[in-house]
Image: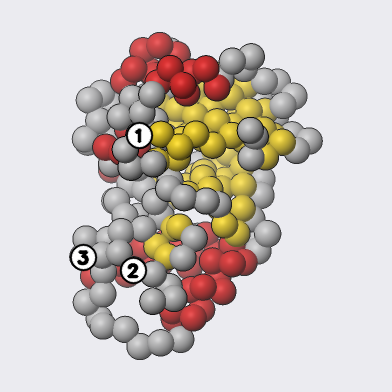
Amino acid sequence: MAMINDNGIFIDRLTLGPYETNAYIAVCLETKESLIVDAPARASVIIASLKGTKPRYILLTHDHFDHTGVITSLRSRLKVPLVAHSLDSLQLKTPPEITMEDGDRLKLGKLEIRVLHTPGHTPGGLCFVIGQYVFVGDTIFPGGPGHTETPDDFQQILKSITEKIFSLPDDTILFPGHGDNTTVKKAKEEYAAFASRPHDPDICGDVTWLM
């Protein structure tokens, strides 16, 4: 069942693999060009979801194994380029055909995709903005930021969230790498509660805004 089906774009979510990782399919309804965001598992299920469309890209939010499990299979079967940040291509078996930086843009039919570089969870984390929808990977979830390994990483992910994600309109819908979607408005409200309290300067790991 489609998550989004409006005048210009169709978006579907597939929750796949042992870590219940979200892969997304986005389709330009005018041209039927499509893309995949992340490739956790079950390549045949992802390919079946593309039926009736013209696949153009595989977009990678970051290079953790639970998001990249079937990238090699999808690339060989679909013959479409992989799009990633150069800092998150080192763990991949083969490099991406297209590397993107903050502010770069791609076209999917009549739709424009804007790239946000959001490091913190990984050095080369990317988010992909299409109109009022954003594929945020593990940068932010309903209730908190993505996992961080060090206090510096945590400060970096806060910067990514507050400067990049929170600069988007309040009604923007965020599609994370795990779990349900949320909105910029709700994420800002949850973060405001977190920011109003004192915190250990060494905070990192799995943090929740309302803890």
Task: Give residue 77's position: percent from left, percent from top.
Answer: 40, 11
Name the residue carrying label 3.
Answer: 150
Which class describes the residues within 10 Å of circle 2: few (<14), some (14-19), or many (20+)? some
The disc labelled 2 sits on which kind of residue? Val
The disc labelled 3 sits on which kind of residue? Thr
Closer to us: mark 3 or mark 2? 2
**Can residue 84 be seen by looking at this rendering?**
no
Q: Is residue 102 above or below residue 171?
A: above
Which numbered disc flags the more N-terminal residue, 1 or 3?
A: 1
Q: Seen in the image, is 161 located left or right of residue 71?
A: right
Which numbered disc flags the more N-terminal residue, 1 or 2?
A: 1
Name the residue carrying label 1.
Answer: 17
What residue appears at the point 72 percent right and 26 percent down from the top-left corner? 29
How far is the residue under mark 1 from the one under mark 2? 24 Å
Quarter placement of the C terminus: bottom left
Closer to us: mark 1 or mark 2? 1
Q: Nearer the viewer, residue 88 or 121?
A: 121
**Can residue 179 be seen by looking at this rendering?**
yes
What residue appears at the point 29 percent right and 51 percent down from the top-left corner? 123
Name the residue carrying label 2.
Answer: 207
Task: Give residue 65's position: percent from left, percent from top.
Answer: 26, 37
Task: Give residue 12's position: percent from left, percent from top.
Answer: 59, 34
Q: Is residue 208 above or below residue 13?
A: below
Q: Nearer the viewer, residue 183 or 156?
A: 183
